[in-house]
Image (spheres, rainbow, N blue to C red):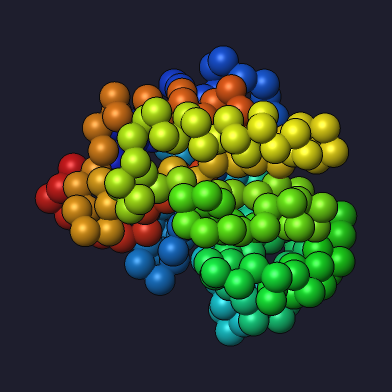
Amino acid sequence: MILGLNSGCVAASANSTTTPTSSNYIVGYYINPNVTPISEIDFNALKSAGITDIYVLVTNKNYSPVLSEAQQKANAVGIRTNAWVYPGFNYASKVAQMRIGVQLDVETYNMPKYLLQILAMRLDTYGETFSVTVKPDGWDGNQYYYLIAPLCDYIVPQLYVGEYQKGITNLTNRIKIYNQIYNIYNILFPGKIVAGLETYQSDKTATPKNTTTLSAEIKAVQPYTQGVILFRYGLSNFNGLE
């Protein structure tokens, strides 16, 4: 049993993303091991659901044992492991030596302030996947995607429609802007966008979305993205809500 995992959400991710896209399409899953211990996650179930990548929250103090456990279980079923870290994480090079990717979570209204740290982490992770998850440009200020794009393998806009009170039309239009109107992403930096999607209604309403709703969001971003990463299931223990 995966604590907080909504089976309908996982089914939606598998059925809606892996079938109509290439084998390189990312279907990711965020894990906070402080709330959902790695030992309590059924990795075979994740693989069967279509998950290709996990993003495991770690700190300077716990990264080595947590990532080692996660990688062992993920490798056994053919899932890629990534460390999910915040600014101030000092061991990106060590993580890369473990053959694990790194995703830096930068939620700010002053992105230029973090560019040197992003560049340093890109250099530290050379040879492994490095991504940056950020606020959605346009929905939540100017996030300077054109400055971030050359410094990472992909950007993950946190397109949480519940938080921003947006609908499917807004979601589709926003992702089109990232990949069509901003030709820089298609021409100079192709395949740079992986959509972060929330599987619960919002922070204020922690009710899991039904399969139809989540599937619609995934289908809306599919043609314009390199993948999706699902946020919230597995992060918290919402017993009784499924």
Residue at the location (61% across, 72% down)? 110
Q: What residue appears at the point 58 percent right and 30 percent down from the top-left corner?
A: 176
Name the residue located 52 percent from the left edge and 59 percent from the top edge.
141
Q: Is residue 10 above or below residue 134?
A: above
Q: Position of residue 186 (x, y in %)?
A: 76, 32
From the viewer's side, name the closer residue of 158 and 211. Answer: 158
The quarter holding residue 230 reads top left
Q: Position of residue 150 (x, y in %)?
A: 82, 52
Count the labels in the image.
0
In this picture, residue 13 sits left or right of residue 73 = left
User: Residue placed farthest to the top in the image?
Assistant: 20
Q: At which x and y percent is residue 117?
A: 74, 74
Q: Is residue 235 visible?
A: yes
Q: From the viewer's side, name the closer residue of 230 and 240.
A: 230
In the rendered image, the quadrant that contains the C terminus is top left
Instruction: Identify whether 152 is placed above or below 210.
Output: below
Q: Is residue 79 visible?
A: no
Judged left or right of residue 117, residue 127 is right
Q: Farthest left residue?
A: 240
Image x and y of residue 175, in percent: 55, 35
State left or right for residue 164 relative to residue 186. left
| Vertical order, 208 against 175 (above or below) | below
